[in-house]
Image: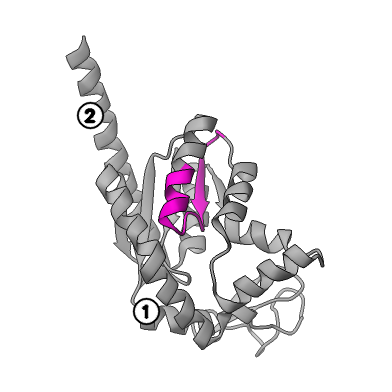
C-alpha cells in the first residue's frame, strides 16, 4: 500500500500519517522532517533553504524531487509533505513509475484557515528533540517546559501568524490544484480534520479500506472480462 497525505500545514497530516502507518504497518515518510535534518549543516545552500522555510515559502521543486527520489523506495509507505505543487505531483508519478511503486490512494485533510492559524501559532517545540506541544490543545505539565527533558520550549521561526497566513496563500494558489488532479484520477479520499483526533483517524481508515475494496473488486471484474 502506497499512500499520499495532503492538506495545509497544520491540518494534522503528520499526526494522521503516523497513526495510519502504525495501523497498516507501513513506513511513514515525512519530507518535512527529512528536510529539516538536511539543512542543519551550516552551508550556503542550507542557509538559503532555511530562509525559504522560515518565510513560509516552498522549497524549489528540483531540490524536493531529489530528496524524494533519495528516500522513496518500492515498499509500502505513506508520504507526508509532498507533493506541494502540480509540477511535483506530475514528477512524483514519473518517479513512482520508474521505481515500480505507483501511488494507490491520496488522503486529503481539509481544515478551515482560522483553525489552521490557531493550531500552528500555538505550537511549541522542544529544542533537544522532536517533542511538540500546544498551548491550548496539548499543553506541557509545566508552562513552556518540555515534559520529557525539562528544556525550554520554543516556537519554530515558520510558526508565526504572518508566516502561517503567507503559507496558506501559497497553499491555496499552488497546492489546492493537486486535490483535483488526484480526484480526476479516481483515488482521492477527503475528510474534515477538525474534532477528535482518534475519530478522524478511524474515519480515514474506514474510507481507505472501502476505497481499496472497490478498487480490488474492479480489478477482479476486469480480469474476468479479459478471460
Region in magenta: 74-92
As helix, strand or loop, the secondary structure at mark 2 comes to: helix
Of pointers 1 and 2, the one earlier in the residue sequence: 1
Between marks 1 and 2, how big is the CA–CA gap? Answer: 37 Å
Provide the residue designation for mark 1.
113
Image: 16 above or below 151: above
Q: Is residue 59 magenta?
A: no
The residue lying furthest to the top in this view is 227
The N terminus, quarter of image? top left
**What is the number of the mark on residue 14?**
none
Instruction: Return the residue nearer the eye: 75 or 183.
Output: 183
Give the image location of residue 226, x and y in percent: 21, 13
The answer to the question of whether label 1 and label 2 lie on touching residues, with beta carbons closer than 8 A, is no
Image: 10 above or below 66: below
The C terminus, quarter of image? top left
As helix, strand or loop, the secondary structure at mark 1 comes to: helix
The residue lying furthest to the left in this view is 225
Whether residue 199 can be seen here: no
Instruction: Return the residue nearer the eye: 119 or 58.
Output: 58
Provide the residue designation for mark 2.
218
Residue drawn at 64 percent across, 81 percent down: 157
Instruction: Return the residue nearer the eye: 33 or 138.
Output: 33
Amino acid at each position: 500500500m502506497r499512500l499520499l497525505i495532503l492538506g495545509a500545514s497544520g491540518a494534522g497530516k503528520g499526526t494522521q500519517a503516523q497513526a495510519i502507518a502504525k495501523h497498516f504497518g507501513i513506513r511513514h515518510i515525512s519530507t518535512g522532517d527529512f528536510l529539516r535534518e538536511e539543512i542543519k549543516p551550516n552551508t550556503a545552500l542550507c542557509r538559503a533553504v532555511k530562509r525559504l522555510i522560515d518565510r513560509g515559502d516552498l522549497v524549489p521543486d528540483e531540490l524536493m524531487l531529489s530528496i524524494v527520489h533519495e528516500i522513496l523506495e518500492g515498499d509500502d509507505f505513506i508520504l507526508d509533505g509532498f507533493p506541494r505543487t502540480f509540477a511535483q505531483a506530475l514528477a512524483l508519478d514519473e518517479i513512482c513509475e520508474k521505481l515500480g511503486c505507483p501511488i494507490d490512494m491520496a488522503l486529503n485533510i481539509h481544515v478551515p484557515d482560522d483553525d489552521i492559524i490557531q493550531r500552528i501559532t500555538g505550537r511549541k517545540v522542544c529544542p533537544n528533540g522532536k517533542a511538540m506541544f500546544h498551548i491550548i490543545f496539548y499543553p506541557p505539565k509545566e508552562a513552556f517546559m518540555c515534559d520529557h527533558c525539562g528544556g525550554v520550549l520554543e516556537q519554530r521561526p515558520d510558526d508565526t501568524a504572518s508566516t502561517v497566513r503567507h503559507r496558506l496563500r501559497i497553499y491555496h494558489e499552488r497546492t489546492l490544484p493537486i486535490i483535483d488532479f488526484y480526484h480526476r484520477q479516481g483515488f482521492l479520499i477527503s475528510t474534515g480534520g477538525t474534532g477528535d483526533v482518534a475519530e478522524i483517524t478511524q474515519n480515514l481508515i474506514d474510507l481507505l479500506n472501502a476505497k481499496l475494496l472497490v478498487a480490488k473488486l474492479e480489478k477482479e471484474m476486469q480480469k474476468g472480462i479479459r478471460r
